[in-house]
Image (tube, rainbow, N blue to C red):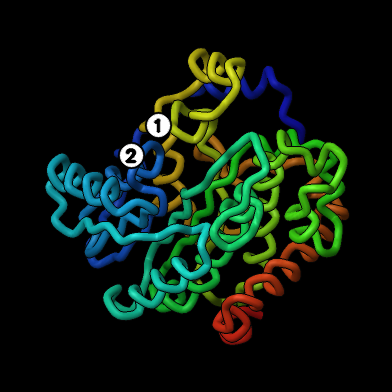
Amino acid sequence: MKLPFTTFIRDQYRRIPEVKSFGTDLTGKVVIVTGANVGLGYETAKHLAAMNPAKLILACRTAATGEKAAADIKRDTGCSTVVCWQLDISDAASVKAFVERFEREGGGKLDILLENAGVTGFSFKRNASGWEQIVGTNHIGTAHLALRMLPFLLKAPKPRLVIVASEVHYWTSDAEQADTDGLLEKLNDEKQEGKFYSTGNRYLVSKLLNVLFVRALASHIPAGTSLTVNSVNPGLCSSSLLREANPAIVLMTRILARTTEVGSRMFVHAAVAPELDGVTGEFLSNCTITEPSDFVISPKGASAGKRLWNDTLRVLSETDAEVPRIVDTCLK
């Protein structure tokens, strides 16, 4: 599928169902939302808190803002089970510490993991783990947390893993370059040349990697396992993610953007909607299953997904010995 800009504009004005039309009772369920202190993550957590979860963990990089978000959600929803745990998804050590805390305090199982935390940027920077910050956070850190939380997800009756992607993956320049061995190391090399590796393309590449990773992970979940994993697109929203954007993008955001509350409905839909029971490996947009880009569904896209899967496991295994053990134990 291609996404012409005119279709994107039309979709921005599409009516998105209200949460009450697909919401459910989360009694007894444990939920994690990353990046939940502001914007889309905050609005998502607020909706989920109203569904009476046994525990709702706001996984936030900055503890102070996370604690304030938790207090505000408690006040506004009456949900007393909201807590904030510190997590910097770009830092492998922080991911491991978060998972170890969940093992001690999480209650043994995880019903919903919604990975919303992400960054964008317009210059080449490295994160705490030494990776280029956009790909290192949006893909490597996100994949790390997803794999480390698999044992807890698989203990829940109908667990869901939701990874936030974007429609911008349709517009990735030279997407065929993703079908390359050692892609992550190449993306970490500031001297790589070409449109695919350009700074302006990095966020788009990271969202393409999210879609490819979700499809690859879904293909490795054993038959008969109730875990589902999907990627979801919130559309263009007025969020802090674009605080460093150039004036043209800021202007477009003011004209076309949805509110973060409207965008969050699509996250909540992916996490709880009954009609998505058993649906896995899909790209969701506007609360519907949507065909991803032509590249993703092409033979080269399938090849890129396999290469990315292998590269990601190799990279993560070098810093976290639990990753290969979990993959061998939990996946096929």
Residue 315 is drawn in which quadrant? bottom right
Q: Quadrant of residue 280?
A: bottom right
Kind of residue at disc 1 = Thr
**In-image side of 114 versus 196 (left or right):** left
**Residue 169 rendering spot, x and y as whole percentages:** 69, 40
Q: In the image, residue 177 lies at what x, y percent?
A: 86, 49
- Residue 99 x %, y %: 41, 73
x 86%, y 58%: residue:
180
In the image: residue 52, left or right of residue 201: left
In the image, residue 275 sits, relative to residue 103, either above or below, namely: above
Tell me the quadrant of the picture where the N terminus can be found. top right
Q: Is residue 213 left or right of residue 266?
A: right
Depicted 207 relative to depicted 153: above or below: above
Measured Cα–Cα span from mark 1 to mark 2: 7 Å
Residue beneath label 1, please? 260
Q: Quadrant of the C terminus?
A: bottom right
Q: Position of residue 281 (x, y in %)?
A: 62, 58
Circle 1 packing at 10 Å, graded few (<14), some (14-19), many (20+), is many
Observer-nearest of 113 and 100 = 100
Asked if 229 appears above or below 11 in the picture, the reply is: below
Circle 2: element type? helix
Total count of labels: 2
Residue at the spot x=63%, y=72% of the render?
Answer: 316
- Residue found at x 18% / y 42%: 72
Q: Are marks 1 and 2 in contact (CB under 8 Å)?
A: yes
**Left or right of 132 in this view: 276:** left
Q: Which mark is residue 143?
A: none
**One can see residue 272 in this view:** yes
Residue 330 visible from this viewpoint: no
Q: Amino acid at mark 2?
A: Glu
For disc 2, the marked residue is: 43
Earlier sequence position, callout 1 versus callout 2: 2
